[in-house]
Image (cartoon, coloured by chain):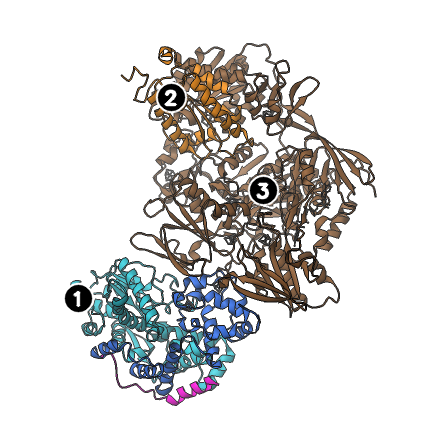
């Protein structure tokens, strides 16, 4: 049931992403092309529809916005030139900013760890990333076998690389967070 | 020899170390110089643009700014880095407001006016198929690869280089030039789900195994990628499919530069193959290439 | 308030610089063909050019046509033959227009005519050259699917029916050797020396009908066209379905020739797509996909078609029913939502498509073949030399209300070159363009027609039959398989034969003179030509007979080529025997032939137009401007009809201003006599001579005499019977009431406007789509946004049917923030009165039927179009039929959209079916053109092949009266016999066959004549 | 044996077939068969009529009386009639005709009604092939001269 319809969200999304969700005529191409749609609670064309309806809470707390892998299949095929992937990016960004409770915690935690890793050292170090992600998400045991295998193949470097210009990188993060 | 400012990307530093080596080795052998961008930092990958737009531009911008100082075009080997660097470059050149904002953040001019290229494209431009063919000393005759670009190499439409964005051809042509019997298939640009590899392994296993099924259906005996992230993801998650899929896939996955090196008869080639999670050596031996 | 008195007026004398009575038609598709035929019957000389080697256009490639599933070639090829055999139409193929100089009435057109390398006059279309040509090329007629040779007749029914050489692929031209064709051509028709030629034509008017170019689906690479062999275009599929196509109509797929079971259609490929810069809707593809699904199933019952679409645009007459039946009765599966891309299985070449099912779940399904419903693009080569404007999509720009008028005076447009459209709309526009041309050049009417002067007809009554027989060799086409001398020998032995000889090419120009000479020399009074099919060659030989001073019905043909030498090539002996038999049958019939009189009746050069709406007024004005007086009868006291309630047109123009201007023109026009407040009491007579009694409200009657009738009595608005609180709550209004409010000064600004579509349309009781209301809603939504930018506008719909360029409006409305919400066909929205506001609840189909509640300050109902209740009374008076929905039924849904099967009666506007104002105008002017073809003749010649009742044997059973589909037979009560009105009779013979007394005879196919053929067959066999 | 019951199995040289073809569809379909050079047995002669609606039952009966072994009536598909409903009348008449023929002792298979459009050259050729085969199997018509005894039986 949807009660209050507002154009606010649509405008906000347009301001941030340049994408006009209102242009959509619901052809469904974005959804039928999406390889992740089976795992989504709201399909991409419905995301666009709900943006038109201004259903902000529902979108920001959806699983879809985190499941979307930004593969851009939707974007390249939309006949109305709506970059659906960017709309979803924007919704994710808004969800983080507004502290919306996501349907799937783990994915935003991963992104947080990923970026945290960059902020700290300037580059991604897989053991650091995995460690922090596993601690924060509480998902301690999955992929243990894989990690052992990779260690055995010498594929995991335990000592992280450090970028000299770490301060620059941190400044970027600070400014971007404002 | 033409030189490029080389952006290796994080995975080259660790899990994809040997692919990085193969890229440098193959490039060098073909007369392409790769000068690493000094003190490069991570491009932010998916996490950047998914969560913070400004960040997703500013992180690559730092690298572009350094590359500007080198006065060279940029060479990339990772599809994700390629996508981010090119994407950020375009936004910065098109949106002056954004550019000056980022300039303030970096303290450097982020407007990179050179070109960001993937090594695959560079080989096409600088070497060309004809010359490549001539350089082959060990044709990959017995190999039946499918080429796999993943989602980020060709998209968004219009952003990436001139290859067909729905049915890219360059890798196929290149592998053919190396002597391989390339198989056609319809999954070249499907996403492998790399960014969800750790968090939603369930989804990724499905996607990856779909790709392997399709590759086998196409009669391929290996998959060739131009992205270390894809490679890692495909290797890591296909064995996992053993649990949920009847037929376990054990299809080797190569980085395209590994095969160039192999076909050109470069020494280093042998030592990269044992590092793969899915051992390609039986296949290569069977094909008389090892 | 009585009628303006009809004033007799002389045809205006041509001004000093009288216009040239000739016209150029560019493009020989169905549009160009119709325009040419109309122009020539209006009395103008016509040049018909095509850039290709034959006329016919895309319709010539189609298998069947929607929504009647009629065979496309069957209905087109008679028109093509008509063009070919008309002396006053010159067909110029392989020609491009370089420049149109001068002005309306006096244009000089420069044509670049490419060489054909085959002499059209000499080529007999035998195809010997094709058999010997070494160069294989993909056959364009089969959309590239089949293979043909470089030299060929474009397709069997081509006009001209002559071969041509494409020098780009010919070995002689590219390599300097070969010339095989020259060696085998017995007609010596091939001429490598032909050169490109520049020609100048003087014409008074030009009609552009270049049609469309099919979209190249390689521009949508996600569908894999050109990569996956089993992904084909709709045009290719049309050829696969064609009985004369590359697979002879077998529904098999290209990769392995396997029969297709699962068949998918992807709609809107290259239409409604901003990505490839084709934002418009191609208007025909929803319907042709439906048609192709049905035909595929007809050919192969096991086919399971699925159509993936955005909106099904079944907006035309009878389209909705066609679509609903396809889905409900014929198992065509419609799935909403486009597939994003196509994947192929490498081994089987099957195709994988992903879609959302009804419950919103993702499905992946394998298909054997996928058809891409490609869009219609502007024709290639619309050069600036034409001096006409193009619109933003590259189609020919035209006037807002007169869509057949280009931006250049004297240059008209029609068909798909102006906007993507189907065949009936193309034909309509073609006639309208011809009418407009006639308005400009009517002073030059009949000035440039060549009229053959015939010697007086020799009276053969009482003469013994002296039959002349010509056996044609047709080069080796007949001569190679049939022993011609033997047949000649045999013919000479037949009773009544005075002379028989063979001839190598009986149809060649020199042979005609030879025939005339023989007729004279031997005193022949009957002629039999044993050659090819009468369907193409009979008119030629009949003409020769006329010039030899004999009645043209003293002629009979024996088809010893198509029906003999060609189909029994491997059995020359039997072919010879059969040729003898066929000749005998023809001779025996010929002996019984009698001269027939073509009926003639006078024409009253004045028309009656019934209905003074936009359609009626335009029809009247068009006729008046071509010089014909018109009676315009309107039952109301005011002109204008429904358009009085419409403010803005679909193109955004001010309708009221247009209407005022139109009424002004009608009132000023001296040739139009308006009868306001009059109704028709009775209509009598027939084509050329109708007598109509009209009566005004005070009972005063007038008797009007006229030669043709145009029916323009319109339709009406559906009155919603309290659906959605209409009439109960003043906030619930119709679109027309909204338009009124939009113009009202100081009207209160609504915060929220909700529109509901399909009110009174597409339901069980009114199973048609009203066509106008989607565009009307979109247009009014935009107007609301313009006047009250803050207002929220919601449009609740089932399918948005903004076909053609109306799609631009739909896009603009979305851009402006109008929200479109789709509800499923069987779950209408509901309305609740909450006192301060109305609340509309709609189940959004895109969200799996989730209910969305909308507050509405205004609820606007998009009510549909209904037939005029007067129709039931008018139909029997005019002797014309109604369709199941109560609209008038035209003579032929595809090719005679404004004619009735009753000659001399035409229709237009809402009387025919729902349509917009511009479409009504076009149809009205088209109807005027058709009426003008009647009025422009001083007398009507009716075919000699008509029924005749022998009064002495007629038993008065009236069987024939009831059977005649054209109501041509009346019963003469005083004499107690049936009587045929030869002006109405079409010569079908249905009556003859049923006449138990043998009194009813069809001339030229008389009982005794057919019996003589039967007996002759038997005698021949017994010899 | 075969002779005794009036049947022969080989395609009979002596078979005589008459086809009534409507001008607009079936005659044109036969033309197309010719243009496409489709080969079919030469034992068929055709009579062109404007519409199958003209074909009186008497023509068909006369044809048999005159010694034809089979008769074809071919016209436009229902709905495609150039004269709106001529072929519809024919279809109605046809059922009556078949019954009438049986009264004469003529097998009803000897009369065939088919819809052949102008685009169906292939169909026309197949029709002739198939019908000739059928008639060959049935053998000469019982009404034919010299066979009357067999018909009376
Ligand atoms: C697959 C498919 C199926 C269809 N099915 C149906 C159907 O079932 N029913 C229906 O009503 N409609 C159908 N249509 C639409 C129908 O084809 C068009 O309505 C119709 O062909 C339009 O006729 P036209 O004369 O305007 O153009 P065309 O048929 O395109 O003819 C144009 C002619 O002009 C010539 N020409 C082009 N450019 C020039 C030039 N510069 N100079 C000189 N000559 C030129 C061309 O050679 C051609 O002969 C279908 C269309 C497609 C693609
Ligand atoms: C609900 C609705 C909404 C529409 N919206 C739009 C729109 O937004 N845009 C658009 O372009 N078009 C629209 N149309 C269509 C448009 O109204 C018509 O195309 C246009 O008015 C032409 O109509 P007409 O002349 O054929 O018929 P009408 O306008 O109906 O005129 C028929 C005339 O004939 C007279 N008449 C009727 N019976 C007799 C008789 N027995 N004897 C004598 N006279 C008779 C009538 O009084 C009337 O004057 C709409 C139509 C309807 C019903
Ligand atoms: S592809 Fe574009 S137009 Fe189609 S449903 Fe998705 S967003 Fe809307
Ligand atoms: S970008 Fe996201 S929504 Fe779009 S197709 Fe890829 S995963 Fe699906
Ligand atoms: S051989 Fe001659 S006459 Fe026959 S089709 Fe060819 S060009 Fe025409
Ligand atoms: S000369 Fe040209 S057209 Fe003639 S047969 Fe040779 S290749 Fe064919
Ligand atoms: S909506 Fe328009 S463009 Fe799309 S398939 Fe239907 S008719 Fe064609
Ligand atoms: S009239 Fe004779 S030469 Fe002419 S086309 Fe017919 S059969 Fe051939
Ligand atoms: S609103 Fe009108 S035009 Fe639109 S679908 Fe319904 S009936 Fe047709
Ligand atoms: S021939 Fe046909 S049209 Fe003429 S009177 Fe007889 S049934 Fe009517």
Task: Give yes or no for residue C349 being in the magenta stretch.
Answer: no
Q: Do labels 3 and 2 share a chain?
A: no
Closer to the camera, C872 or C544? Answer: C872
Start-end of magenta stretch: A154-178
- Total numbered badges shown on the rendered structure: 3
Q: Colour of chain B?
A: cyan
Closer to the camera, C969 or D105? Answer: D105
Q: Quadrant of residue C175?
A: top left
Quadrant holding the N terminus of chain C? top right
Q: Colour of chain A?
A: blue
| Gap in angstroms between the C-alphas marked 2 and 1 | 72 Å
User: Could you tell me which chain the residue with mark 3 belongs to?
Assistant: C
Q: Element type at marker 2?
A: loop
Q: Mark 3 points at which residue?
A: C427
Q: Chain C is drawn in which colour?
A: brown
Q: In which quarter of the image is residue A155?
A: bottom left
Q: In which quarter of the image is residue B230?
A: bottom left
Find residue C227 and report its horizontal and vertical position in percent.
36, 54
Q: Nearer the viewer, mark 1 or mark 3?
A: 1
Find residue C953 and report its horizontal and vertical position in percent.
61, 14
Position of residue C129 in the picture relative to residue D94 (left or right): left
User: Could you tell me which chain the residue with mark 1 belongs to?
Assistant: B
């Amino acid at each position: 049931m949807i009660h209050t319809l507002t154009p606010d969200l649509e405008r906000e999304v347009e301001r941030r992403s340049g994408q006009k969700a209102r242009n959509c005529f619901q052809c469904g191409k974005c959804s039928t092309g999406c390889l992740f749609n089976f795992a989504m609670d709201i399909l991409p064309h419905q995301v666009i529809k709900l943006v038109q309806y201004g259903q902000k809470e529902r979108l920001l707390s959806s699983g879809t916005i985190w499941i979307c892998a930004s593969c851009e299949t939707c974007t390249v095929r939309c006949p109305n030139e709506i970059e659906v992937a960017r709309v979803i990016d924007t919704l994710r960004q808004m969800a983080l900013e507004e502290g919306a409770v996501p349907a799937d915690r783990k994915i935003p935690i991963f992104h947080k760890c990923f970026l945290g890793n960059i902020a700290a050292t300037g580059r991604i170090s897989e053991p650091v990333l995995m460690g922090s992600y596993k601690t924060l998400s509480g998902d301690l045991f999955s992929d243990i076998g894989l990690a052992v295998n990779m260690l055995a193949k010498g594929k995991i470097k335990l000592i992280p690389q450090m970028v000299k210009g770490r301060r620059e990188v941190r400044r970027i993060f600070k400014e971007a967070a404002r | 020899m033409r030189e490029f400012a080389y952006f290796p990307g994080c995975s080259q530093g660790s899990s994809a170390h040997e692919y990085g080596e193969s890229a440098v080795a193959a490039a060098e052998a073909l007369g392409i110089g790769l000068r690493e961008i000094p003190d490069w930092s991570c491009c932010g990958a998916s996490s950047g643009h998914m969560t913070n737009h400004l960040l997703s531009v500013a992180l690559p911008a730092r690298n572009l700014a350094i590359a500007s100082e080198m006065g060279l075009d940029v060479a990339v080997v990772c599809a994700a880095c390629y996508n981010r660097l090119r994407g950020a470059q375009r936004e910065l050149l098109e949106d002056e407001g954004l550019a000056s904002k980022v300039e303030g953040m970096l303290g450097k001019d982020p407007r990179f006016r050179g070109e960001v290229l993937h090594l695959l494209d560079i080989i096409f431009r600088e070497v060309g198929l004809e010359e490549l063919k001539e350089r082959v000393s060990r044709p990959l005759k017995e190999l039946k690869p499918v080429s796999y670009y993943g989602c980020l190499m060709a998209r968004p439409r219009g952003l990436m280089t001139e290859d067909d964005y729905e049915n890219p051809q360059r890798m196929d042509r290149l592998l053919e030039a190396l002597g391989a019997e390339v198989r056609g298939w319809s999954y070249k640009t499907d996403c492998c789900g790399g960014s969800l590899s750790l968090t939603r392994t369930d989804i990724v296993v499905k996607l990856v195994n779909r790709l392997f099924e399709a590759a086998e259906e196409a009669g391929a005996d290996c998959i060739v990628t131009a992205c270390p992230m894809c490679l890692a993801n495909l290797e890591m998650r296909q064995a996992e499919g053993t649990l949920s899929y009847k037929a376990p896939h054990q299809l080797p996955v190569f980085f395209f530069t590994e095969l160039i090196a192999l076909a050109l008869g470069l020494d280093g080639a042998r030592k990269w193959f044992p590092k793969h999670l899915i051992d390609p050596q039986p296949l290569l031996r069977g094909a008389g290439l090892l | 308030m009585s009628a303006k008195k009809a004033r007799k007026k002389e045809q205006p004398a041509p001004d000093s610089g009288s216009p040239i009575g000739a016209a150029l038609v560019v493009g020989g598709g169905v549009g160009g063909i119709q325009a040419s035929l109309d122009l020539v019957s209006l009395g103008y000389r016509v040049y018909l050019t095509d850039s290709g080697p034959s006329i016919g256009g895309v319709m010539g490639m189609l298998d069947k046509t929607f929504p009647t599933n009629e065979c496309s070639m069957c209905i087109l090829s008679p028109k093509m033959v008509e063009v070919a055999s008309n002396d006053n139409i010159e067909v110029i193929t392989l020609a491009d227009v370089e420049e149109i100089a001068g002005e309306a009435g006096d244009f000089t057109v420069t044509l670049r005519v490419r060489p054909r390398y085959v002499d059209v006059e000499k080529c007999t279309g035998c195809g010997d050259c094709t058999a010997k040509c070494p160069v294989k090329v993909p056959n364009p007629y089969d959309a590239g699917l089949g293979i043909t040779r470089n030299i060929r007749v474009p397709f069997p029914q081509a006009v001209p029916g002559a071969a041509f050489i494409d020098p780009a692929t010919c070995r002689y031209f590219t390599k300097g050797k070969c010339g095989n064709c020259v060696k085998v051509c017995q007609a010596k028709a091939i001429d490598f020396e032909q050169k490109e030629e520049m020609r100048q034509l003087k014409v008074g008017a030009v009609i552009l009908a270049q049609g469309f170019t099919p979209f190249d689906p390689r521009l949508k690479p996600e569908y894999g066209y050109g990569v996956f062999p089993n992904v084909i275009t709709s045009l290719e599929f049309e050829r696969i379905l064609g009985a004369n196509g590359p697979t002879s109509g077998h529904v098999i797929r290209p990769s392995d020739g396997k029969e297709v079971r699962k068949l998918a259609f992807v709609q809107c490929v290259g239409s409604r797509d901003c990505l490839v810069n084709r934002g418009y809707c191609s208007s025909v593809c929803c319907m042709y996909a439906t048609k192709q699904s049905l035909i595929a199933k007809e050919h192969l019952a096991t086919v399971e078609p699925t159509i993936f679409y955005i909106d099904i645009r079944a907006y035309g007459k009878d389209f909705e029913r066609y679509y609903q039946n396809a889905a409900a009765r014929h198992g065509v599966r419609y799935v909403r939502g486009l597939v994003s891309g196509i994947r192929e299985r490498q081994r089987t070449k099957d195709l994988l498509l992903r879609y959302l099912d009804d419950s919103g779940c993702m499905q992946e399904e394998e298909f054997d073949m996928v058809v891409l419903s490609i869009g219609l693009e502007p024709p290639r080569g619309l050069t600036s030399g034409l001096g006409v404007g193009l619109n933003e999509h590259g189609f020919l720009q035209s006037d807002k209300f007169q869509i057949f008028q280009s931006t250049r005076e004297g240059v008209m447009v029609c068909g798909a070159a102006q906007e993507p459209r189907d065949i009936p709309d193309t034909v309509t526009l073609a006639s309208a363009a011809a009418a407009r041309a006639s308005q400009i050049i009517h002073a030059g009417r009949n000035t440039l027609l060549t009229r053959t002067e015939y010697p007086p007809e020799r009276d053969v009554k009482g003469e013994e039959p002296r039959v002349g027989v010509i056996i044609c060799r047709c080069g080796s086409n007949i001569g190679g398989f049939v022993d011609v001398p033997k047949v000649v020998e045999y013919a000479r032995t037949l009773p009544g034969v005075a002379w028989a000889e063979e001839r190598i090419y009986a149809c060649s120009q020199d042979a005609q003179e030879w025939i005339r000479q023989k007729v004279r020399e031997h005193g022949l009074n009957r002629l039999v030509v044993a050659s090819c099919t009468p369907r193409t060659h009979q008119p030629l030989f009949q003409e020769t007979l006329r010039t030899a001073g004999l009645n043209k019905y003293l002629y009979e043909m024996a088809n010893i080529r198509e029906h003999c030498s060609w189909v029994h090539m491997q059995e020359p002996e039997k072919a010879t025997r059969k040729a003898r038999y066929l000749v005998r049958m023809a001779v025996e019939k010929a002996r019984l032939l009698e001269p027939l009189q073509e009926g003639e009746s006078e024409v009253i050069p004045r028309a009656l137009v019934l209905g003074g709406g936009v359609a009626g007024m335009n029809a009247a004005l068009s006729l008046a401007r071509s010089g014909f007086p018109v009676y315009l009868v309107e039952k109301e006291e005011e002109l204008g009809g429904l358009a009085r309630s419409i403010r803005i047109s679909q193109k955004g123009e001010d309708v009221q201003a247009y209407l005022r201007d139109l009424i002004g023109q009608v009132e000023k026009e001296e040739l139009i006599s308006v009868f306001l407040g009059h109704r028709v009491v009775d209509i009598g007579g027939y084509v050329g001579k109708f007598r109509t009694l009209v009566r005004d409200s005070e009972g005063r009657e007038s008797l009007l005499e006229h030669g043709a009738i145009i029916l323009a009595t319109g339709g009406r608005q559906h009155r919603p019977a309290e659906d959605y609180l209409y009439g109960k709550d003043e906030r619930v209004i119709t679109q027309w009431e909204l338009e009124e409010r939009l113009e009202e000064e100081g009207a209160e600004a609504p915060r929220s406007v909700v529109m509901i579509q399909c009110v009174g349309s597409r339901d069980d009781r009114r199973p048609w789509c009203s066509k106008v209301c989607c565009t009307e809603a979109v247009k009014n939504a935009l107007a609301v946004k313009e006047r009250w930018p803050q207002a929220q506008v919601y449009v609740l719909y089932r399918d948005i049917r903004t076909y053609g360029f109306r799609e631009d409006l739909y896009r603009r409305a979305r851009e402006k923030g109008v929200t479109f919400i789709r509800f499923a066909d069987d779950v209408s929205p509901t309305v609740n009165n909450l006192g301060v506001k109305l609340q509309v609840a709609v189940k959004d189909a895109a969200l799996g039927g989730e209910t969305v509640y909308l507050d509405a300050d205004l609820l606007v109902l998009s009510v549909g179009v209904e037939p005029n209740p007067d129709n039931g009374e008018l139909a029997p008076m005019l002797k014309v039929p109604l369709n199941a929905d109560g609209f008038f039924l035209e003579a032929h849904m595809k090719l005679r959209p404004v004619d009735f099967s009753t000659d001399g009666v035409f229709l237009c506007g809402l009387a025919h079916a729902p349509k917009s104002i511009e479409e009504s105008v076009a149809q009205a002017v088209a109807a005027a053109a058709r009426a003008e073809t009647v009025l422009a003749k001083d007398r009507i010649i009716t075919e000699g092949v008509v029924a005749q009742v022998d009064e002495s044997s007629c038993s008065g059973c009236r069987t024939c009266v009831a059977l005649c589909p054209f109501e041509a037979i009346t019963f003469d009560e005083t004499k107690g016999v049936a009587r045929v009105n030869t002006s109405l009779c079409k010569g079908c013979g249905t009556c003859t066959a049923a006449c138990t007394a043998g009194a009813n005879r069809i001339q030229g196919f008389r009982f005794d004549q057919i019996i003589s053929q039967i007996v002759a067959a038997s005698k021949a066999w017994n010899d | 044996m075969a002779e005794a019951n009036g049947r022969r199995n080989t395609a009979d040289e002596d078979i005589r077939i008459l086809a009534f073809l409507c001008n607009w569809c079936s005659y044109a379909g036969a033309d197309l068969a010719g243009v496409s050079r489709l080969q079919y047995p030469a034992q068929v002669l055709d009579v062109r009529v404007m519409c199958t609606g003209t074909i009186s039952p008497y023509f068909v009966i006369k044809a048999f009386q005159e010694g034809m072994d089979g008769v074809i009536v071919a016209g436009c598909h229902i709905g495609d009639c150039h004269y709106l409903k001529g072929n519809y009348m024919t279809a109605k008449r046809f059922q009556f005709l078949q019954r009438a023929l049986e009264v004469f002792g003529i097998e009803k298979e000897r009369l065939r009604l088919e819809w052949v459009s102008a685009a169906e050259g292939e169909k026309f050729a197949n029709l002739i092939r198939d019908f000739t085969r059928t008639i060959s199997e049935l053998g000469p018509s019982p009404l034919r001269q010299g066979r009357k005894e067999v018909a009376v039986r």
